Amino acid sequence: MAVAAVENKPDLNQNKTLLEETFYVLTKKNSVFRVKLTNTGLSLIKESENQVKTQIIPIKDIIGCRCLRSKKPASSCACQSLPHTSSFKVVDEKSGEHDDTDVSAYLYIYSYIFHQNCSKRDRTTITLRFRSFDKYEDNYKEAQRWRSVLKRLIRGEQISQINTVDYSTINHIKEDRRLLVLLSPKSGSGKGRVLFQKKIVPILQEAEVPYDLHITKYANYAREFIRTCNLFQWTGVIVVGGDGIVFEVINGMFERWDWSEALKHVAVGVVPGGSGNGLARSIAYSCSEPYGSPTLPAALAAVRNHNEPMDLVRVETTTQIMFSFLSVGWGLLSDIDIESEGLRVLGGQRFALWSVARLIGLRSYTGKVYYLPADATLPVQDCSNVTWESNNKFELPAEVHLETQVGRQRLDSWYSAASRRSTYFSTTGSSYQSTAESSGDSINKPRMYGPASQLPCLTSPLPSSWKCMSGRFIMVHASYQTHLGSDCLFAPSAKLNDGVIWLLIIHANASRSQMLQFLLGLSTGAHANPNSWNGVIELLPVRAFRIEPDLNEQGYMTVDGEHVEYGPIQAEVFPALARVMVP
Ligand SMILES: Nc1ncnc2c1ncn2[C@@H]1O[C@H](COP(=O)(O)OP(=O)(O)OP(=O)(O)O)[C@@H](O)[C@H]1O
């Protein structure tokens, strides 16, 4: 049996026909389809009444295919040779429910065709019925041959030539992927389970991608799970929920001593099930993927085996280190995020409703904002004044993970500004611990790993290359993604992996009407035009920043929409630290 030989080298002849067959449309007399498979797509050439029309389905729009057999009808009639399309059903050949009277093998091809003119995708199933041979086994082999070649093309392999290969070598296509699905039943309006079953499972099944589903049982469950599980049994993590659960997953990875390997090998996919869904929307936007059906880009990303690097931002407060993928906020947007928590049942509408409330009672906050412009380089960390536990110097390897027994009284497992003196540094990786006096709480807190900071500690002055603004601010909000929520195009120029933080600063002299214009502009990105604001609103590309709020006032600060303590906070970008699944 002839079959395609597979190579990973790019083939110059992308349009060379790999497989070709003629099919007939049973319901339309004289309708003939020639179907061709090439490296770039599946061509359906329709020949009827002297007309020839061609439709090409690009390989990237096809997610899977399966060989099936017709199912025994409920009331079987021995003389029936052709299935009636209305009652026609197919089953797996091993189901035992197949119809012996039909020797055909059916190849179901599942595609989500992108229509550029209306920027949407439509699900289309193409069924090819193989019945040239008298025996089912022969028709099945032919259908499998197509399936095998198509599956390899879907995986991104290039096929250069048709060789003569033993059929048995293509009968089984090994799936080397397995996904972990972490689903939060509390995110958004609490419909995560239904969403997953209805919208994601069918696509995973069509693509034959195996997965293990874990439902979160309490807040921080996902974080603990990622920290303690054997993560490398999976090739990716699909998070079903909002940005809060993504935050748990990312930070859970940094609580693993093998964080670097985990981030490199286990990509994160996001199915938007929360009320904000900033990351899910940003990923779709970065690939110009239609978002009409918000779960579709995520489902396609999950099955397509296509990942891209994403920047992460290391955030430091006086008590915590976090790794953030979305935003750091102080003032208006953080107030809206935290104060609208009680309206969670409204889903994304809660933000719009609370924006109106906050606009009426507009607040401003006193403080200082420091930032390092994007075109400046971060100075290399000077470790000469770091007090090492031992004076005996030794050569550091590329990565250092330092741990001690858990539970020793003198350990504060959270690295903090106050504990900088006793932090261990490494060139590419660090484990943070200190000899600072530990509070009871911190003893059981997991240790945070991750790349070493290049910033001075939070209590130290910043170098002169940093710029400073001092005064009253309605808000200071940093984002490294385009979208803070499904309908909030906050930083239109942001890229998943450009090493830039977009810092939006609104000074206290912005009027209510300017604030209204700003809030309305967020849905389209119109607010990002610097000429509109006479300097009261600024959007600056930076590498790092620090906010020092006046502690005589109270307010909210958020990281990725999560509430953090009110006080000094600083952040620096680490380009391409994580990997995300993209459609
Ligand atoms: N089983 C659970 N019981 C209680 N809380 C949970 C459970 N699972 C997850 N959580 C918590 O619920 C919160 C859900 O937040 P998440 O961000 O996922 O949704 P959201 O706030 O609606 O969306 P967004 O952050 O995009 O606005 C998270 O902080 C998470 O820790």
Image (spheres, rainbow, N blue to C red):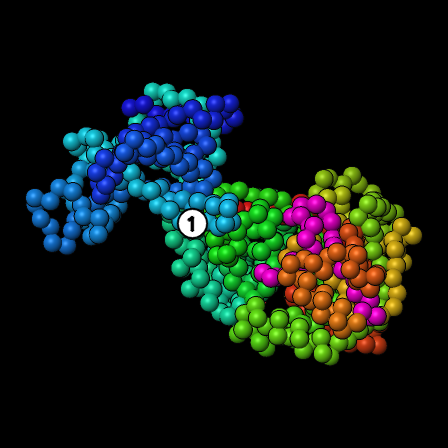
Amino acid beneath label 1 = Asp
In the image, the segment drawn in magenta is 485-510
Q: Is any part of residue 67 visible from this angle?
A: no
> 455 or 420: which is nearer to us?
455
* Residue pointed to by mark 1: 122
Report the label total: 1
- Residue 567 locus on image (x, y percent): 79, 69
490 magenta-colored: yes
279 magenta-colored: no
- Residue 418 locus on image (x, y percent): 82, 63
Is 570 displayed left or right of 492 in the figure? Answer: right
Secondary structure predominantly adopted by residues drawn in magenta: loop
Residue sitting at 69 percent across and 67 percent down?
519
Label 1 element class: strand
Residue sitting at 35 percent across and 27 percent down?
19
Q: Quadrant of residue 80?
A: top left
Q: Is any part of residue 475 visible from this angle?
A: yes
- Does the beta carbon at disc 1 come under 8 Å from ligand 1? no
